[in-house]
Image (cartoon, rainbow, N blue to C red):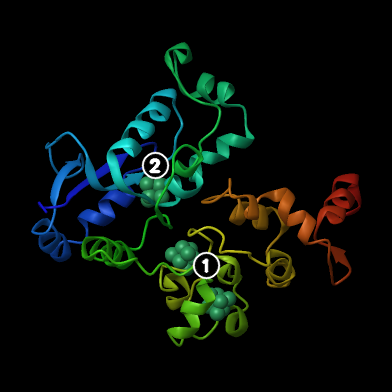
Amino acid sequence: MGTPTLAVWKFTSCDGCQLTLLDCEDELLTLAGRVRITHFAEATSVDAPGPFDVSLVEGSITTPDEQRRIVDIRAQSRVLVAIGACATHGGIQALRNFADVAEFASVVYASPQHIATLSTATPISAHVRVDLELRGCPIDRGQLVRTLCALLDGRAPDLPDTSVCTECKRRGNTCVTVANGTPCLGPVTHAGCGALCPTYQRGCYGCFGPMKNPNIGALLPILRVNGMSTDAVDRVFGTYAAAAPEFADRSRDEQSDQTIDGELVGESGRRRRSAGDGR
Ligand code: SF4
Ligand code: SF4
Ligand code: SF4
């Protein structure tokens, strides 16, 4: 068997996840000795034709051209790994899914008639089969290196689908919510970052997106008790994985029609507030 080929592709994204790969430095030198990089625009002008043993795909699909390009890349890739919140959930740009894209284009561009764009930003898995997903904005460097090593060794990578809380407890952290009353999305957020934010005394804000079967209804009252307003809750769930059904506004409302200190925090609470008898 020849040297395996690795290609790194960019779709609609900020390049931050590709930079995480470049940031691997020492590991990247070792990796470069084990693979032949055939496309990685952030690192090299090499642009060799497929097929590719491993394709890392950054970014979401937001244009007709990207829709065509991802199908072609999938067809040429033995293993396709979506990297980062843009590729796994549509990313921050998926906020457009709940707005008027034509209006945005008219405000941002002097000649919007030249802009070819879709009305949505969607994850790679909405268009082609994805073999693995690395979550996060950006991805976790250690998880990326471990995943690449496993693929090169012919092993299945260990990608836990539990919550950030499990990693936080494993690190021996003191819970920032329990100790300081800091709101934290760790109980419902997909593991993989090693509980980075709580380790530095910050609450998790959910950049790895929802874990499998998150119990959001149980977390919402705790966020509210610890000082998050309804708007703040909407913002924290509606940023990095706004398009994830589990984090969607409607889904939260249905799970959370609960009362805290006499105030409804779910859909009924919203109706009361919009009728003028709440905040
Ligand atoms: S997931 Fe975050 S860091 Fe990665 S490309 Fe998207 S916006 Fe950038
Ligand atoms: S700090 Fe956050 S992630 Fe850590 S145990 Fe508490 S709620 Fe979970
Ligand atoms: S703790 Fe939460 S916000 Fe921080 S890196 Fe991990 S998943 Fe992202």
Residue 59: assigned label = 2
| Foreground of the two, 72 or 40 | 72
* Amino acid type of the residue tagged 2 in the rendering: Gly
Q: Earlier in the sequence, mark 1 or mark 2?
A: 2
Query: Does the beta carbon of the residue at mark 1 sit less than 8 Å from ligand 3?
Result: yes
| Foreground of the two, 19 or 75 | 75
| Foreground of the two, 21 or 205 | 21
Q: What number of labels is visible? A: 2
- Image quarter (top left, top right, bottom left or bottom right) of the C terminus: bottom right
The picture places residue 142, in percent across and down from the top left corner, at 30, 68
Residue sitting at 29 percent across and 43 percent down?
Answer: 77
The picture places residue 51, in percent across and down from the top left corner, at 22, 39
* Amino acid type of the residue tagged 1 in the rendering: Cys
Helix, strand or loop at mark 1: loop
Determine the CA span between mark 1 and mark 2. 22 Å
The picture places residue 91, in percent across and down from the top left corner, at 48, 45
| Foreground of the two, 98 or 203 | 98
For this orientation, the residue located farthest to the front is: 1
Query: Does the beta carbon of the residue at mark 2 sit less than 8 Å from ligand 1?
Result: yes
Mark 1 vs mark 2: give the one in front. 2
